[in-house]
Amino acid sequence: MKLTPLQIAEFYREGFLALEDVFTDSDLQPVIDEINEEIDRRAREMAASGSLSKSYEEEGFETRLTRITAETDRLYYSICSGQLDGPGVFSLLTNPKMVDIAESLVGPEIIASSVYRLRPKIPGFPHGVVPWHQDSGYFEPFCDKSLVLTAWIPLVDATPERGCLQVIPRAHTGEVVRHRVHSSLPYLEIPPEAIPEGDWLTVPVRKGGVLLLTNRTPHASIENITDVIRWSADLRYQNADLPTNFMTAGSRPFREPKETEPVACYPPEADFLVRSRKRPGDVVTDWQRFRDLRQRHIVHPVADRWGKWTDDNIKS
Ligand SMILES: O=C(O)CCC(=O)C(=O)O
């Protein structure tokens, strides 16, 4: 599904674009199944070892992790931290509809990034509420002025009550503003006085839709005041001419790093090529290779642009 010229113009003008009815249930089911299987496997293990009172099999996708997290948050954090990398996640990252949309914005040579996250926003659990930030706050400054596309995909209807996202329209064209480490959550946040001017907008997206954001679009995610989990995935795509740490099957860098450039827009996690007309043989087409790339990846830290690695700043 290519974007129309009007949609592309709207994305660049507003800094975001919400699309409905992009994915069918069968596009999303493999990743939902993979999450359910992981929760089931881990819950049974934890119940058997006594670290969970029971495995909560009677609960479904929208409630089971809430019950488990009321006893222990270990499973919650392992899902959020991007550890799931099976065929379900890979099928979403490489879904042709998604890659077509990405192509409309970043061009035909497309790198996807391992900076994808699966987010179970559990009612009342503070970690799900993400403060105002620009994704570039987390990336290498070198990539600030280029597009690193975020595709935010709800796996259930994301309503305002369930804690959908908020954005500040037309606030994505300036510099990346100052971020700091949040006082209690493991996130960067824009301090209130540095939040770009403009009226924020709450953007509900139904299951099947996708919210596209630029890396400089200020956005936040609000509290879930319902009794069900707001599940979502956020994926990232960039043009292959930008710095990337993708390693080809011959274990050679896809793009020779230049001294004046960072090794990738987000060096801690592995990139991989999802579409290319110039080098179709290098495209990653199976999930085992995707997992392998992630597991072999040599972690390089991202530039410490906010002084966030020092204890003093973490506490400020
Ligand atoms: O899903 C959320 O609640 C937050 C997502 C987000 O901030 C992001 O994808 O950058």
Image (cartoon, rainbow, N blue to C red):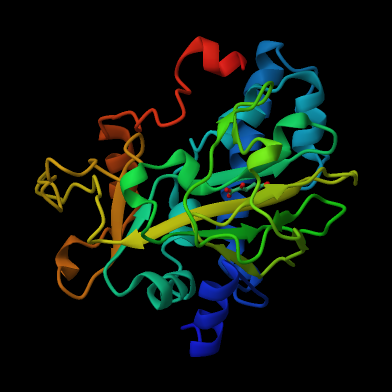
At x 61% / y 28%, what residue is drawn? 77
Q: Position of residue 19 (x, y in %)?
A: 64, 75
Q: Residue furthest bottom?
A: 5
Q: Position of residue 46 (x, y in %)?
A: 66, 19
Nearer-the-camera pick, 144 or 243: 144
At x 83% / y 39%, what residue is drawn? 58
Nearer-the-camera pick, 57 or 206: 206
Q: Position of residue 269 (x, y in %)?
A: 36, 38
Answer yes or no: is residue 143 visible: yes
Q: Position of residue 102 (x, y in %)?
A: 43, 70
273 vs 50, left or right, is left
12 vs 298, left or right, is right
Question: Residue 130's quadrant in the figure?
Answer: top right
Question: Residue 109's quadrant in the figure?
Answer: bottom left
Quarter of the rendering occupied by the C terminus: top right
Nearer-the-camera pick, 29 or 150: 150
- The vertical placement of 55 against 133, above or below, is above
Count of labels shown?
A: 0
Answer yes or no: is residue 265 visible: no
141 vs 184, left or right, is left
- The vertical placement of 158 against 61, above or below, is below
Q: Residue furthest right?
A: 226
202 vs 300, left or right, is right
At x 28% / y 30%, what residue is drawn? 300
